[in-house]
Image (cartoon, rainbow, N blue to C red):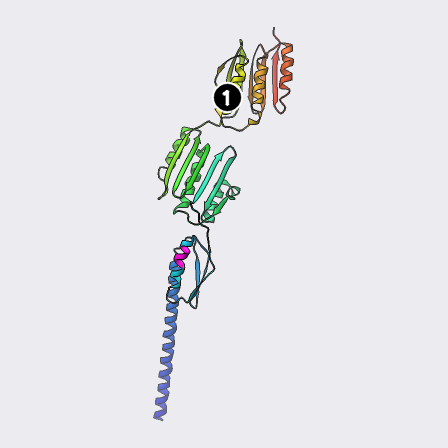
Protein backbone atom coordinates (compact mmCIF):
# COMPACT_ATOMS: atom_id res chain seq x y z
CA UNK A 1 0.00 0.00 0.00
CA UNK A 2 2.79 2.37 0.91
CA UNK A 3 4.53 1.52 -2.33
CA UNK A 4 1.42 2.36 -4.31
CA UNK A 5 1.12 5.68 -2.55
CA UNK A 6 4.74 6.42 -3.28
CA UNK A 7 4.31 5.54 -6.94
CA UNK A 8 1.18 7.71 -7.12
CA UNK A 9 2.99 10.59 -5.48
CA UNK A 10 5.89 10.25 -7.89
CA UNK A 11 3.46 10.23 -10.81
CA UNK A 12 1.89 13.45 -9.58
CA UNK A 13 5.31 15.02 -9.17
CA UNK A 14 6.29 13.96 -12.69
CA UNK A 15 3.06 15.33 -14.13
CA UNK A 16 3.44 18.64 -12.31
CA UNK A 17 7.07 18.91 -13.32
CA UNK A 18 6.20 18.07 -16.90
CA UNK A 19 3.47 20.67 -16.98
CA UNK A 20 5.83 23.23 -15.51
CA UNK A 21 8.50 22.39 -18.08
CA UNK A 22 5.99 22.60 -20.92
CA UNK A 23 4.66 25.90 -19.61
CA UNK A 24 8.15 27.32 -19.29
CA UNK A 25 8.94 26.12 -22.81
CA UNK A 26 5.79 27.71 -24.22
CA UNK A 27 6.53 30.91 -22.33
CA UNK A 28 10.06 30.93 -23.72
CA UNK A 29 8.76 30.35 -27.24
CA UNK A 30 6.26 33.18 -26.82
CA UNK A 31 8.97 35.45 -25.46
CA UNK A 32 11.27 34.65 -28.38
CA UNK A 33 8.43 35.21 -30.85
CA UNK A 34 7.55 38.53 -29.21
CA UNK A 35 11.20 39.55 -29.23
CA UNK A 36 11.45 38.69 -32.91
CA UNK A 37 8.27 40.61 -33.70
CA UNK A 38 9.55 43.62 -31.76
CA UNK A 39 12.90 43.49 -33.55
CA UNK A 40 11.17 43.27 -36.95
CA UNK A 41 8.88 46.19 -36.07
CA UNK A 42 11.84 48.27 -34.90
CA UNK A 43 13.74 47.74 -38.15
CA UNK A 44 10.68 48.44 -40.31
CA UNK A 45 9.83 51.59 -38.34
CA UNK A 46 12.79 53.23 -40.03
CA UNK A 47 11.42 52.71 -43.54
CA UNK A 48 10.23 55.90 -45.17
CA UNK A 49 6.84 54.65 -46.35
CA UNK A 50 6.06 52.26 -43.50
CA UNK A 51 6.82 48.79 -44.86
CA UNK A 52 4.99 46.22 -42.70
CA UNK A 53 5.95 42.68 -41.70
CA UNK A 54 4.00 39.80 -40.18
CA UNK A 55 5.91 37.07 -38.33
CA UNK A 56 4.53 33.52 -38.47
CA UNK A 57 6.61 30.59 -37.22
CA UNK A 58 9.82 32.42 -38.00
CA UNK A 59 8.74 33.56 -41.47
CA UNK A 60 8.62 37.35 -41.96
CA UNK A 61 6.10 38.31 -44.67
CA UNK A 62 6.77 41.84 -45.91
CA UNK A 63 4.37 44.17 -47.74
CA UNK A 64 4.42 47.83 -48.72
CA UNK A 65 6.84 50.07 -50.58
CA UNK A 66 10.53 50.73 -50.10
CA UNK A 67 11.63 54.26 -50.93
CA UNK A 68 14.80 53.19 -52.73
CA UNK A 69 16.81 50.10 -53.62
CA UNK A 70 19.33 51.25 -51.06
CA UNK A 71 16.70 51.21 -48.31
CA UNK A 72 15.61 47.70 -49.31
CA UNK A 73 19.22 46.49 -49.43
CA UNK A 74 19.75 47.82 -45.91
CA UNK A 75 16.57 46.39 -44.37
CA UNK A 76 16.29 42.89 -45.88
CA UNK A 77 19.63 41.48 -44.61
CA UNK A 78 19.01 42.89 -41.14
CA UNK A 79 15.65 41.12 -40.99
CA UNK A 80 17.10 37.86 -42.26
CA UNK A 81 19.82 37.97 -39.59
CA UNK A 82 17.47 38.29 -36.62
CA UNK A 83 17.26 35.50 -34.05
CA UNK A 84 14.12 33.50 -34.64
CA UNK A 85 13.78 34.43 -38.32
CA UNK A 86 13.80 31.42 -40.63
CA UNK A 87 13.33 33.35 -43.86
CA UNK A 88 11.95 36.61 -45.27
CA UNK A 89 9.18 36.55 -47.85
CA UNK A 90 9.43 39.86 -49.70
CA UNK A 91 6.26 41.06 -51.47
CA UNK A 92 7.24 44.74 -51.43
CA UNK A 93 7.74 47.16 -54.30
CA UNK A 94 10.48 49.77 -54.63
CA UNK A 95 9.99 53.27 -56.04
CA UNK A 96 12.06 54.35 -59.05
CA UNK A 97 14.80 56.71 -57.95
CA UNK A 98 14.46 60.43 -58.66
CA UNK A 99 17.92 61.80 -59.43
CA UNK A 100 17.93 64.73 -59.38
CA UNK A 101 14.76 65.08 -57.34
CA UNK A 102 12.73 67.94 -58.79
CA UNK A 103 9.47 69.84 -58.75
CA UNK A 104 8.87 72.69 -61.21
CA UNK A 105 6.06 75.25 -61.05
CA UNK A 106 6.11 77.32 -64.25
CA UNK A 107 3.94 80.44 -64.58
CA UNK A 108 3.65 81.84 -68.10
CA UNK A 109 1.37 82.96 -70.90
CA UNK A 110 0.14 79.38 -71.29
CA UNK A 111 -0.95 79.35 -67.65
CA UNK A 112 0.48 77.33 -64.80
CA UNK A 113 2.39 74.13 -65.58
CA UNK A 114 3.51 71.64 -62.95
CA UNK A 115 5.99 68.80 -63.38
CA UNK A 116 8.33 66.80 -61.20
CA UNK A 117 8.27 64.25 -58.41
CA UNK A 118 6.60 63.49 -55.10
CA UNK A 119 7.49 60.80 -52.56
CA UNK A 120 3.95 59.88 -51.56
CA UNK A 121 0.23 60.54 -51.91
CA UNK A 122 0.27 63.08 -49.08
CA UNK A 123 2.55 65.49 -50.96
CA UNK A 124 0.58 64.95 -54.17
CA UNK A 125 -2.60 65.84 -52.27
CA UNK A 126 -0.87 68.95 -50.91
CA UNK A 127 -0.23 70.16 -54.47
CA UNK A 128 -3.71 69.18 -55.65
CA UNK A 129 -5.38 71.06 -52.78
CA UNK A 130 -3.55 74.26 -53.70
CA UNK A 131 -3.45 74.07 -57.50
CA UNK A 132 -6.13 71.57 -58.54
CA UNK A 133 -6.12 67.83 -59.16
CA UNK A 134 -5.65 68.17 -62.93
CA UNK A 135 -2.26 69.88 -62.52
CA UNK A 136 -0.82 66.88 -60.67
CA UNK A 137 -1.21 64.57 -63.69
CA UNK A 138 2.40 65.21 -64.74
CA UNK A 139 3.78 64.70 -61.22
CA UNK A 140 5.31 61.24 -60.72
CA UNK A 141 5.95 59.30 -57.54
CA UNK A 142 9.66 58.71 -57.09
CA UNK A 143 11.99 57.63 -54.31
CA UNK A 144 14.95 59.51 -52.92
CA UNK A 145 13.27 62.77 -51.90
CA UNK A 146 15.38 64.94 -49.59
CA UNK A 147 14.29 65.19 -45.98
CA UNK A 148 11.65 67.89 -45.37
CA UNK A 149 10.57 67.75 -49.02
CA UNK A 150 6.96 68.36 -47.97
CA UNK A 151 7.98 71.57 -46.21
CA UNK A 152 9.93 72.72 -49.25
CA UNK A 153 6.94 71.99 -51.52
CA UNK A 154 4.69 74.01 -49.21
CA UNK A 155 7.11 76.93 -49.42
CA UNK A 156 7.25 76.69 -53.23
CA UNK A 157 3.44 76.80 -53.38
CA UNK A 158 3.40 79.82 -51.06
CA UNK A 159 5.84 81.65 -53.36
CA UNK A 160 3.96 81.00 -56.60
CA UNK A 161 1.27 83.73 -56.28
CA UNK A 162 4.01 86.39 -56.13
CA UNK A 163 5.56 85.31 -59.44
CA UNK A 164 4.02 87.05 -62.45
CA UNK A 165 5.90 85.02 -65.05
CA UNK A 166 8.72 82.66 -64.21
CA UNK A 167 9.65 79.45 -62.44
CA UNK A 168 9.63 78.21 -58.87
CA UNK A 169 11.77 75.07 -58.82
CA UNK A 170 13.02 72.54 -56.31
CA UNK A 171 16.03 70.48 -57.33
CA UNK A 172 17.34 68.23 -54.58
CA UNK A 173 18.08 70.65 -51.71
CA UNK A 174 17.96 73.90 -53.70
CA UNK A 175 14.88 76.11 -54.03
CA UNK A 176 15.17 78.59 -56.89
CA UNK A 177 12.81 81.38 -57.93
CA UNK A 178 13.37 83.15 -61.24
CA UNK A 179 11.32 85.47 -63.41
CA UNK A 180 9.30 88.65 -63.16
CA UNK A 181 7.19 90.05 -60.34
CA UNK A 182 4.55 92.72 -60.77
CA UNK A 183 5.32 94.86 -57.73
CA UNK A 184 8.01 95.55 -55.17
CA UNK A 185 5.67 94.10 -52.54
CA UNK A 186 5.73 90.79 -54.42
CA UNK A 187 9.51 90.87 -54.55
CA UNK A 188 9.73 91.68 -50.84
CA UNK A 189 7.28 88.89 -50.01
CA UNK A 190 9.44 86.36 -51.87
CA UNK A 191 12.51 87.53 -49.98
CA UNK A 192 10.70 87.30 -46.64
CA UNK A 193 9.31 83.81 -47.29
CA UNK A 194 12.70 82.44 -48.34
CA UNK A 195 14.67 84.06 -45.52
CA UNK A 196 14.41 80.91 -43.38
CA UNK A 197 13.98 77.88 -45.67
CA UNK A 198 13.47 74.31 -44.37
CA UNK A 199 16.55 72.80 -42.72
CA UNK A 200 18.99 71.49 -45.28
CA UNK A 201 17.71 73.67 -48.14
CA UNK A 202 19.36 76.65 -49.79
CA UNK A 203 17.68 79.39 -51.83
CA UNK A 204 18.61 80.94 -55.18
CA UNK A 205 16.63 84.07 -56.14
CA UNK A 206 16.69 85.78 -59.54
CA UNK A 207 13.54 87.91 -59.68
CA UNK A 208 13.01 91.37 -61.10
CA UNK A 209 10.17 93.79 -61.59
CA UNK A 210 8.27 93.12 -64.78
CA UNK A 211 5.34 94.53 -66.63
CA UNK A 212 2.14 94.97 -64.67
CA UNK A 213 -0.93 93.12 -65.85
CA UNK A 214 -3.03 96.25 -66.24
CA UNK A 215 -6.23 95.86 -68.28
CA UNK A 216 -5.44 96.51 -71.93
CA UNK A 217 -6.61 99.91 -73.14
CA UNK A 218 -5.69 102.49 -75.71
CA UNK A 219 -6.76 106.08 -76.17
CA UNK A 220 -5.77 109.04 -78.29
CA UNK A 221 -6.80 112.65 -78.82
CA UNK A 222 -6.35 114.48 -82.09
CA UNK A 223 -6.21 118.23 -82.29
CA UNK A 224 -4.27 120.75 -84.33
CA UNK A 225 -2.57 118.01 -86.29
CA UNK A 226 -1.18 116.32 -83.14
CA UNK A 227 -1.92 112.86 -81.71
CA UNK A 228 -1.74 112.53 -77.93
CA UNK A 229 -1.52 108.85 -76.97
CA UNK A 230 -2.25 107.05 -73.69
CA UNK A 231 -3.15 103.58 -72.42
CA UNK A 232 -1.86 100.15 -71.43
CA UNK A 233 -0.82 98.07 -74.41
CA UNK A 234 1.16 94.84 -74.97
CA UNK A 235 4.90 95.48 -74.88
CA UNK A 236 5.39 94.08 -78.38
CA UNK A 237 2.79 96.52 -79.72
CA UNK A 238 4.36 99.76 -78.49
CA UNK A 239 6.82 100.27 -81.40
CA UNK A 240 4.18 99.41 -84.00
CA UNK A 241 1.55 101.76 -82.56
CA UNK A 242 4.04 104.61 -82.25
CA UNK A 243 5.26 104.08 -85.82
CA UNK A 244 1.69 103.94 -87.14
CA UNK A 245 0.80 107.15 -85.30
CA UNK A 246 3.94 109.02 -86.40
CA UNK A 247 3.18 108.24 -90.02
CA UNK A 248 -0.04 110.22 -89.62
CA UNK A 249 0.70 113.11 -87.26
CA UNK A 250 3.02 114.57 -84.68
CA UNK A 251 2.87 112.35 -81.59
CA UNK A 252 3.10 112.93 -77.85
CA UNK A 253 1.87 111.18 -74.72
CA UNK A 254 2.83 107.97 -72.92
CA UNK A 255 1.96 104.34 -73.52
CA UNK A 256 2.28 101.99 -70.53
CA UNK A 257 2.90 98.30 -71.08
CA UNK A 258 0.84 95.41 -69.78
CA UNK A 259 1.08 91.62 -69.72
CA UNK A 260 -2.70 91.18 -69.58
CA UNK A 261 -4.15 88.78 -72.13
CA UNK A 262 -7.73 90.03 -71.79
CA UNK A 263 -8.92 91.33 -75.14
CA UNK A 264 -5.48 90.88 -76.68
CA UNK A 265 -6.92 89.20 -79.77
CA UNK A 266 -8.15 92.60 -81.04
CA UNK A 267 -4.63 94.02 -81.14
CA UNK A 268 -3.10 95.50 -83.29
CA UNK A 269 -5.91 95.73 -85.84
CA UNK A 270 -8.24 97.77 -83.63
CA UNK A 271 -5.55 100.18 -82.45
CA UNK A 272 -4.48 100.90 -86.03
CA UNK A 273 -8.08 101.35 -87.19
CA UNK A 274 -8.77 103.69 -84.26
CA UNK A 275 -5.83 105.91 -85.23
CA UNK A 276 -6.76 105.87 -88.91
CA UNK A 277 -10.32 106.92 -88.09
CA UNK A 278 -9.25 109.57 -85.60
CA UNK A 279 -6.94 111.44 -87.99
CA UNK A 280 -9.84 111.76 -90.45
CA UNK A 281 -11.59 114.02 -87.95
CA UNK A 282 -10.86 117.70 -87.58
CA UNK A 283 -10.58 117.06 -83.86
CA UNK A 284 -11.67 114.18 -81.69
CA UNK A 285 -10.87 111.41 -79.27
CA UNK A 286 -10.87 107.62 -79.50
CA UNK A 287 -10.60 104.89 -76.88
CA UNK A 288 -10.34 101.11 -77.07
CA UNK A 289 -11.03 98.91 -74.05
CA UNK A 290 -12.71 95.58 -73.41
CA UNK A 291 -13.58 94.95 -77.06
CA UNK A 292 -15.30 98.34 -77.41
CA UNK A 293 -14.17 101.28 -79.55
CA UNK A 294 -15.51 104.76 -78.81
CA UNK A 295 -14.96 107.67 -81.17
CA UNK A 296 -16.27 111.19 -80.86
CA UNK A 297 -15.35 114.45 -82.48
CA UNK A 298 -15.95 116.72 -85.45
CA UNK A 299 -15.71 115.49 -89.05
CA UNK A 300 -17.05 116.38 -92.46
CA UNK A 301 -19.77 114.24 -94.02
CA UNK A 302 -17.23 112.76 -96.44
CA UNK A 303 -14.85 111.94 -93.59
CA UNK A 304 -17.68 110.40 -91.57
CA UNK A 305 -18.52 108.07 -94.46
CA UNK A 306 -14.86 107.07 -94.75
CA UNK A 307 -14.67 106.49 -90.98
CA UNK A 308 -17.81 104.33 -91.03
CA UNK A 309 -16.35 102.20 -93.82
CA UNK A 310 -13.00 101.71 -92.06
CA UNK A 311 -14.48 100.85 -88.68
CA UNK A 312 -17.09 98.60 -90.23
CA UNK A 313 -14.35 96.16 -91.25
CA UNK A 314 -13.40 95.38 -87.66
CA UNK A 315 -15.89 92.58 -87.04
CA UNK A 316 -16.45 91.59 -83.38
CA UNK A 317 -15.83 95.03 -81.90
CA UNK A 318 -18.57 97.15 -80.37
CA UNK A 319 -18.52 100.59 -82.02
CA UNK A 320 -19.79 103.72 -80.32
CA UNK A 321 -19.31 106.62 -82.74
CA UNK A 322 -20.52 110.15 -82.11
CA UNK A 323 -19.42 112.67 -84.75
CA UNK A 324 -20.64 116.19 -85.40
CA UNK A 325 -20.37 118.17 -88.61
CA UNK A 326 -18.15 121.24 -88.60
CA UNK A 327 -19.94 124.53 -87.99
Q: Give the side of residue 217 with respect to residue 30, left or right.
A: right
Q: Residues within 10 Å of mark 1 (few under 14, many from 20)?
A: some
Q: Which residue is mark 1?
A: 238
Q: Position of residue 279 (x, y in %)?
A: 57, 13
Above or below residue 202? Residue 254 is above
> Looking at the rendering, which quadrant does residue 202 occupy?
top left
Instruction: Indicate left or right for 216 with 210 as reference.
Output: right
In the rendered image, residue 325, in percent from the top left (x then y), is placed at 62, 9
Q: Position of residue 60 (x, y in %)?
A: 43, 64
Residue 122 appears in the rendering: yes
Question: From this viewpoint, which residue is outermost toward the bottom?
Answer: 1
Residue ID at (37%, 34%):
191
Q: Quadrant of the C terminus?
A: top right
Position of 117 relative to 42 (above/below): above
Percent position of residue 299, x then y: 61, 10
Residue drawn at x 37%, y 35% is 192
Toward the viewer: 123 or 325?
123
Which residues make up the magenta segment?
71-75
Q: Is residue 72 magenta?
A: yes
Secondary structure under the numbered disc 1 in the rendered image: helix
User: Which residue extends farthest top?
Assistant: 327
Q: Is residue 263 visible?
A: no
Q: Is residue 292 left or right of residue 112?
A: right
Instruction: Judge whether residue 108 is colored magenta.
Output: no
The one nearer the camera, 80 or 209, is 80
In the depicted structure, whether residue 318 falls above or below residue 188: above
| Quadrant assignment for the N terminus | bottom left
Amino acid sequence: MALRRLIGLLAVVVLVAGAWIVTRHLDAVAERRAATEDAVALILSGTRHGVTGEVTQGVVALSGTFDTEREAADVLPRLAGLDGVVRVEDATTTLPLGAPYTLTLRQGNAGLQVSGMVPDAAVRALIADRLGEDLTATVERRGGAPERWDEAVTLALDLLPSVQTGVVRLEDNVLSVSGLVATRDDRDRIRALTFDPPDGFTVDLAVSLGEIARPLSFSARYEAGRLILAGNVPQVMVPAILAHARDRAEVSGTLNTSTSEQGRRVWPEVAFAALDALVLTESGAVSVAGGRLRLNGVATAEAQADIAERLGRLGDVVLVVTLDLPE
